[in-house]
Amino acid sequence: MSILTIGRRRISPRTAWAAGRQLISPFTSQESSASISQFPWEQTPKSLPRPFPPLASSSSGRAWLHSHANRFQASIKGVPKICSFSGQALDGLPVSRLVDIPLAQTGEGIAECELLKWFVQEGDEVEEFQPLCEVQSDKATIEITSRYKGKVVQFLYVPGDIVKVGETLLKVLVEGFGDETQVSGLTEGHLAKPEVIETQQDKNKICGVLSTPPVRDLAKQHGIDINDVRGTGTDGRVLKEDVLQYAVEKGILEEHVSSAASSKEQFDESENHTNAPDGVRWSYEDKKIQLRGFQRAMVKSMTMAAKVPHFHYVEEINCDALLELKASFQGNTTELNVKHTSLPLLIKLLSMAMSKYPMLNSCFNEESFEVSLKGSHNIGIAMATPHGLVVPNIKNVQSLSVLEITKELSRLQLLAMDNKLSPEDISGGTITLSNIGAIGGKFGSPLLNLPEVSIIAIGRIKKVPQIADDGGVYPASIMMVNIGADHRVLDGATVAKFCNEWKRFIENPELLILHMR
């Protein structure tokens, strides 16, 4: 039987023909005068020319091969080097290909993301658009989905790793994938379909071994190439025991254990000479924390903001009427799942004040010296979350009712706490409101959220004694506000006038009715 060798693969034409593959057997050799014309027509691929010349001799067979369009160079035992396969007959064969799934561009200016978690395991079958993993940039948390239907072969990163945009996250074996790279008319996928004889080690080097991220980490710790480890798990999966056994065989683990033992002896010896009393063993060790996600974004944004000349304007505002209106909303609400607070009212009244002073709702381009007056009031709300400081914004506040603002604010707060904010929720802000009073403190001095030109910090509303014009003392609910402004764009007079307008609306919230449309 003739054997076709291509690279490391050896293909048995007789077995391929018997298995029903539409693969034309190598033509006659010097030892055998068999030809395709000897096969019954019902078993012969229909894509061959009919009738085709009988191959009674190697010279006539070689001439026919040279005239055929689909041919490639191969090494065949006992036959000439040139042999022919029908490309048309192989068009219907299923093709498998190992596909790299890269980290796509998740947003403008995003260069890298942190891998938070995997939704699949190595060896799992995945469908198109099925979520594969969750990553977090310095702007949002995003799910990466599969573009193909196939089988997960290998993870290249573990949760907590920083992945640059464009780098491969994982490898997926895809069935029915057309390969554009052909070898003289015959694809590599086609060649892999007949009986293929290759070693497990070669297969691992091509596709990557099956193993879990902890096992790969263990191999890295001992400096072991996991492709060299023979897996004893299902489908050749490399287990923890396989890595440890390989380390023992190579003498790596023994060296590691002995070094650890010697370190322990040194530590015990040092402890014997300590002056600390028995039973008292304090350990104060430095700990390094890698900043990720929103915390890393804060480093970048605050570094840029510190270079901008700021000035701050502080004012006290009486919120008695505002609190009465909020209490009225709470007592007359028809939606039980809606919690009314003062913040939605402050946001709506802020939008009304910005309509008169649009310079506060603008962005500055330092390179072109241009100020863009924004038509939409996209008011950002600074939120402290377990994942860091994040500033989602409520879009088009000027067109929303107080109830709609309340619902949107609640939605953003829930998403922020679950680290599920989308890029759309975070981008496009025009001014920022920081409610530090929800945590504590009278007021703060905020830094700009560039390219915005203003930011407002509001403190806690507190009951304090006030002196009336007639000298009487009365209690009042006072809130401190601190407006931070970009002094390259805004001057003190403009900010003071804007603050006075906002204060007038807050102290007289019934003016909302005059501005309703």
Image (tube, rainbow, N blue to C red):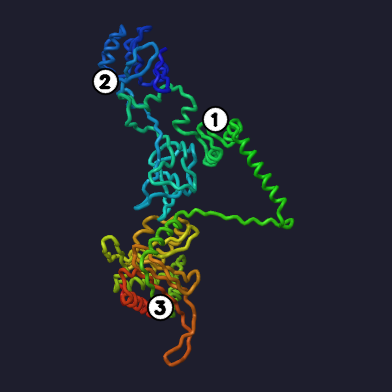
Q: Which mark is residue 230?
A: 1
- The one of 201 and 280 positioned closer to us in this rendering: 280
Q: Amino acid at mark 3?
A: Glu
Q: Label 2 amino acid?
A: Ala
Instruction: Please name the residue that numbered disc 3 is placed on.
Output: 315
How crowded pointer 2 is (Cα within 10 Å; few <14, some 14-19, many 20+) is rated as: few
Foreground disc of the pair 3, 2? 3
Callout 2 secondary element = loop
Amino acid type for the residue under numbered disc 1: Arg
Question: Which image quadrant: the C terminus?
Answer: bottom left
Residue appearing at x 41%, y 49% in the figure = 112
> Disc 1 to disc 2, how far (Cα)?
43 Å
> On the picture, is 241 further left or further right than 206?
right
**Could you say whether the residue bearing mark 3 is in a helix, strand or loop?**
strand
Give x and y (percent) for residue 292. Answer: 46, 54
Query: Is tag 1's residue or tag 3's residue first in the polypeptide sequence?
Result: 1
Cβ atoms at labels 1 and 3 below 8 Å apart: no
Q: Is residue 167 left or right of residue 212?
A: left
Few, some or many residues within 10 Å of mark 1 (<14, 14–19, 20+) = some
Residue ID for mark 2: 69
